[in-house]
């Protein structure tokens, strides 16, 4: 049985990704930061999968937490096949770089970039030994173009750096059975993060060319595809799932 390790896997898009791997028959480590009430709810909801689930509390900005989570996963399941970096700390307050506190800057860099380094140091050797692994990181729309993003300077700097890191891992691990790719979701907000595609089709979205909002299920399906055994030709790639919004923006520019 293959194993998926998903950071921030109990809420939002991460929850839909977790569901995808559970339904696929995998065992799953679900990292969460603090919402124990949500975990208790999911333990009841996913009771049929309880022997395949490990909930682990941990903060991805802390190397010690990352180390502990990987160790506990290996102790229980003995392998990690899919590493999905769903966690991505974000500061919602709109402010320019000059107004950032030091701790806010470091939280963005540690949580969105350094965390992938720490996980990779621990998990890539495991995947090499298995001769199989799929790593998925998250970016934002057009991250591979290194755009500036006003009021989001720390987050965007981390994610643009993560584009290069993801591609570097892909090159370095090519030939070992490991792939590394990045997903860039569109502006999926609120309830749509845990919504199904079918439910989204019932709600018109004039801002998106395809006519509906993106959902967590859209992202989970894309991740599922690039994690398949036969998707080994797909590595070092950046995929947008925005319903065509980024195509319009490029055309206008």
Image (spheres, rainbow, N blue to C red):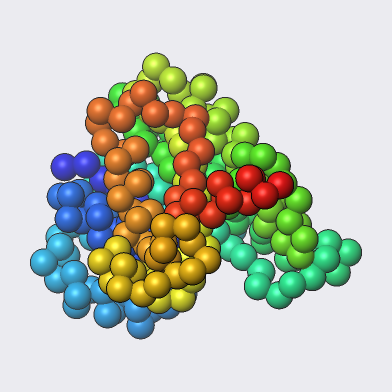
Q: Is residue 237 above or below residue 6?
A: above
Q: Determine the residue positioned at 33% across, 69% down.
A: 200
Near-viewer residue (95 or 169): 95
Q: Residue furthest top?
A: 175
Q: Position of residue 65 (x, y in %)?
A: 50, 57
In which quarter of the view is residue 89 placed? bottom right
- The answer to whether residue 241 of the structure is visible from this angle is yes
Answer with left or right where residue 46 lies relative to residue 90: left
Q: Determine the residue positioned at 26% across, 36% down.
A: 228
Q: Residue furthest left?
A: 48
For the N terminus, the image quarter is top left
Q: Position of residue 34 (x, y in %)?
A: 46, 75
Q: Residue furthest right?
A: 98
Answer with left or right where residue 249 lies relative to residue 230: right
Answer with left or right where residue 162 lies relative to residue 230: right
Q: Position of residue 16 (x, y in %)?
A: 32, 62
In which quarter of the view is residue 51 placed? bottom left
Near-viewer residue (169 or 196): 196
Near-viewer residue (144 or 134): 144
């Amino acid at each position: 049985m293959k194993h998926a390790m998903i950071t921030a896997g109990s809420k939002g898009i991460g929850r839909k990704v977790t569901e995808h791997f559970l339904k696929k028959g995998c065992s799953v480590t679900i990292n969460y930061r603090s919402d124990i009430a949500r975990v208790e709810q999911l333990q009841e909801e996913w009771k049929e999968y309880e022997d395949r689930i490990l909930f682990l509390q941990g903060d991805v900005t802390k190397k010690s937490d990352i180390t502990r989570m990987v160790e506990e996963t290996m102790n229980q399941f003995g392998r990690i096949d899919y590493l999905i970096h769903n966690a991505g700390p974000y500061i919602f307050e709109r402010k320019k770089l000059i107004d950032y506190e030091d701790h806010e800057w470091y939280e963005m860099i540690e949580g969105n970039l350094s965390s992938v380094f720490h996980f990779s140091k621990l998990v890539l050797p495991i995947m090499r030994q298995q001769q199989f692994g799929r790593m998925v990181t998250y970016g934002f729309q057009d991250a591979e173009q290194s755009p500036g993003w006003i009021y989001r300077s720390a987050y965007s700097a981390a994610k643009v750096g993560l584009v290069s890191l993801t591609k570097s891992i892909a090159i370095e691990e090519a030939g070992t059975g490991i792939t590394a790719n990045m997903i860039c979701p569109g502006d999926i907000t609120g309830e749509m993060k845990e919504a199904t595609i079918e439910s989204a089709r019932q709600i018109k979205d004039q801002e998106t060319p395809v006519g509906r909002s993106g959902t967590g299920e859209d992202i989970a399906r894309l991740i599922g595809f690039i994690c398949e055994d036969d998707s080994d030709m797909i590595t070092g790639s950046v995929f947008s799932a925005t319903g065509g919004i980024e195509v319009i923006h490029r055309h206008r520019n």
